Image (cartoon, helix red, strand yellow):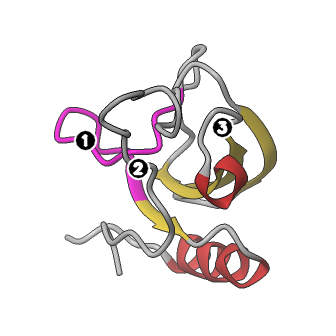
Amino acid sequence: MMGMSLGSSCSSAPNNPDAVAPNPRNFKIIERRKYEHTTVLHVNYPNCTNYEGRKILVFKGIPLIEGELDPHFSEYDQSLIARFAPTEDGWIQANDYAFNYREAP
């Protein structure tokens, strides 16, 4: 499950990329849970159109949020380790995953 997207991702529309893609500088953290090795965030990206812009993200450690929070996996920043469907079930699954997360030796 690690590194697997179980939720949605907003893809850019060819004629208006800002219409659906989440803007990493325009977000609101709805809920946050911190565990020993991970943090789970329920985030709203108001400009993203699917799932009303909601994302459930799991990060290694505590994400450094300095005005920007990108909900996409990146080879440069590997702190995002999982995404889940932005539903009640997804929130439960994300927290179960985060609580039990251990880094590979």
Q: Where residue 54 sits in the image (x, y, percent)?
A: 68, 53
> Which image quarter: residue 14?
top left
Q: Where residue 90 sits in the image (x, y, percent)?
A: 65, 78
Q: Which badge, 1 or 3, is on the more N-terminal residue?
A: 3
Residue 80 is tagged as: 2
For numbered disc 2, what is the local secondary structure?
Answer: strand
In contact (CB < 8 Å): disc 1 and disc 2: yes
Q: Which badge, 1 or 2, is on the more N-terminal residue?
A: 1
Please name the residue that numbered disc 1 is placed on: 74
Residue type, numbered disc 1: Ser
Residue interval drawn in magenta = 69-81
- Relative to 47, does residue 87 appear above or below in the rendering? below
Distance between mark 1 and mark 3 Cα atoms: 18 Å
Membership of 70 in magenta stretch:
yes
Q: Where residue 28 sits in the image (x, y, percent)?
A: 76, 33
For numbered disc 1, what is the local secondary structure?
Answer: loop
Identify which residue is drawn at 37% across, 47% down.
11
Between tags 2 and 3, which lies in front? 3
Q: How crowded is mark 2: few (under 14 residues within 10 Å), some or many (20 or more)?
A: many
Residue 45 is tagged as: 3
In this rendering, would 37 be left or right of 99? left
Residue situated furthest top in the rendering:
67
